[in-house]
Amino acid sequence: MGNLILSRPLDIKRPYYVQELGVHLYSAEELCYYIYHYVTLIDENFADERLLDFIHQLDQPRLEERILRTREQGGLYDILYVILQELRYYSSSDLFQFRRQLEKLSRSSQAERLREKGDLLFERGQYYAAVRTYNQILDLDSRELADAEFVSRIWQNKAACYARTEHFEEALDNLKNAWLLTRSSGLAEKMYALNRLMGKDEVPEPVKTAVTDDMLEQFRSNWDKRWQLAAYQGKALEAAALADKPEPERTRACLELLYRWKEEYRKKQLS
Amino acid sequence: MDGLILGIDLCDTHSQISVFSPEKGEPEAILTGESENTSLISTVLCKLKGSDTWLIGYEAYRRALMGEGTMVDKLVKLLYKNGSATIEGVRYSAVELMSHYIEQLLALPRAAYGQEEVRCLAFSLRELSPDLLDRLTLACDACGIPRSRLRFLSHTECFAFFAASRPREIWPNMVVGFDLNDEGMDYYEMRVLRGRRPQVLEARRESLEEAFDLDVLDTAVGERMADSILSSCADRLLAKKLISSVFLTGDGFSNVTTWAPEFLKRLCNKRKVFEGQHLFADGAAIQAYDSTREETMFPYVCICEGRLSSSISVYAVRDGRNEQLTLASAGSNWYEARSSAEFILDDVQTLELMITPFATQRVEVIPISLAELPARPNKATRIQVIISFASENHVTARVVDKGFGELFPASGMVIRRDFLIS
């Protein structure tokens, strides 16, 4: 059995802007949610004047004071914990879980923390921000990047970001880098699929020698199946749903859908 | 703060207006001089030909009879039906006509007291319907009276508060009232239940089928018949009840001592009996004054027509503690009891509204499924719960999806549930 949490609407004149997510926060609850779910996006400069101004608008003088005190004595994670504790949006068991998460983050390497951040941005559709984060990992000291599997995963994630923004050439280049580290046949098939999207029925050059004719035939068969299924999934399904509508509603709905897709595309490009 | 504190008893045939005097501590009726210094003002409106002058009451009748203007009557019924009337080729909506009527009605206390400002205006109506009240509000908007200064009360509430404002010796036990006029006959009861904290002021109205046309009082035979009808009503309604006082109101009772000896004999049986014309207007003015005070003169929960007999609440977490949060309180005026609150869903699939009747404290739960709301992570959906009323029994609960800021934009979806409370 859950609970209703009473929410007090406040007239916030200067919402807190979260650049990584491209959203404004307007309430204490949203701030808590952001901290709890996106802790890996938060950097050391979080407790700045902007945050204090926002807390001031939330009419939380005690929290303002505690943040200032913690900023002097503790680190970022202490400040985040203080905020969640003071605003009481999450239960004590939630706070316990959060504390565990912070401890885990403290123990993890910089590369792992950045990968979590990149994955979160990817999930939110912030593809370019995710690419920037993955690049930060690849720029790290080589000692941090000793695990070839881990680095291959980063290249793959970057490739996924490029594929989502329809930059197939860049995606292919990143997958090649990933393949060079692990030589996995799964990656070879992904590269074949990217090539098919660009109108080529082959695997790219460095992979060719590792892919037999039988494997290629299997890739081709899998692609055909996926291509056929694509007509009944995702965006195609959204468009198909409009076909049964009577005119002029159908035209209006199609235009609205196109507008939405354009907006989504623009958002992806700008993120 | 200066300004007139007014109570208007708005009926289809006659209206009355009372002004509360804080200095005297009681309301004073505006006497119109239409006949024998009565406070009755006919609910009619007359527009003089070729001019923008509007008249009400007796003068409206007179000028219309002389052919100097066009008269519209039954203004309350017209407003209820949202009708219209065409005068000199111009169509006037019921709201416009009512606003002219109210404007002219307000001119009376303004002239008598030399004050323009209206600090609070309470209407007393026989029955409260949401459409009627909405249109009456619009008519008052047109008169420039801010909505925050308006109150709408049932005759039952006005009767109850009028009686409760009298000295205590008037109402140690039950107080009853009879209202006899051209529109019918109503019986009222009011009593204070003292065993509870806070005390309960309980009132009810019964529309009497035995009502008769006041024209029967024009003949001696008719008077005897009316006396007989009223006597049998008194026998039926007052039997086995401990009654302290009886109030008679309405123009039907204006000469009751001359034609209803048997009825009065039954009433004046160890009880105080009062006759007066402006009970509802006075009751409305008393309530208007009470609403301007910081502390109420009536520390009771009022359970009657026009007031909620049950509380509506939800359990919600406030500042980390689980509390019962009241959205509408028993005893509040249903028209003013509209409320809303915002909540965040923490693993909640069903909103449970707790209905607690004041009399029994037996809680009924009204579940509202939230399954239709967009799927979001836990604690990332804000809902607005709006409770409104179409009468004291008919509740509409609406749940509006407010999203969760820009993190999860609102869908604007509304889940509506209508239900009845006792």
Image (spheres, helix red, strand yellow):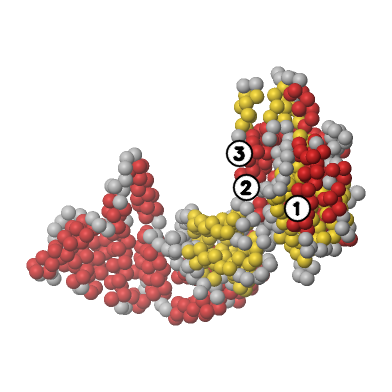
Q: Which mark is residue B233?
A: 1
Earlier along the polypeptide chain: callout 3 or callout 1?
A: 3
Which residue carries the number 2 mark?
B130
Q: Position of residue A246 (x, y in %)?
A: 31, 42
Seen in the picture, residue A176 relative to B218 is either above or below; the reply is below
Query: Which is in the foreground here, disc 3 or disc 2?
Result: 3
**The C terminus of chain A, quarter of image:** bottom left
| Chain identifier of the residue bearing label 1 in the image | B
| Chain identifier of the residue bearing label 2 in the image | B
Viewer can see residue B17 = no
Quarter occupied by residue A124: bottom left
**What amino acid type is highlighted by mark number 3?**
Lys
| Chain identifier of the residue bearing label 3 in the image | B
Q: Nearer the viewer, residue B321 or B204?
A: B204
Q: Position of residue B137 (x, y in %)?
A: 67, 42
Which residue carries the number 3 mark?
B81
Helix, strand or loop for disc 2: helix
| Marks 3 and 2 on same chain | yes
Q: Residue furthest left?
A: A213
Q: Is residue B348 left or right of residue A216?
A: right
Quarter occupied by residue B164: bottom right
Viewer can see residue B12 = yes
Real-space Cα separation, disc 1 to disc 2, in angstroms: 32 Å
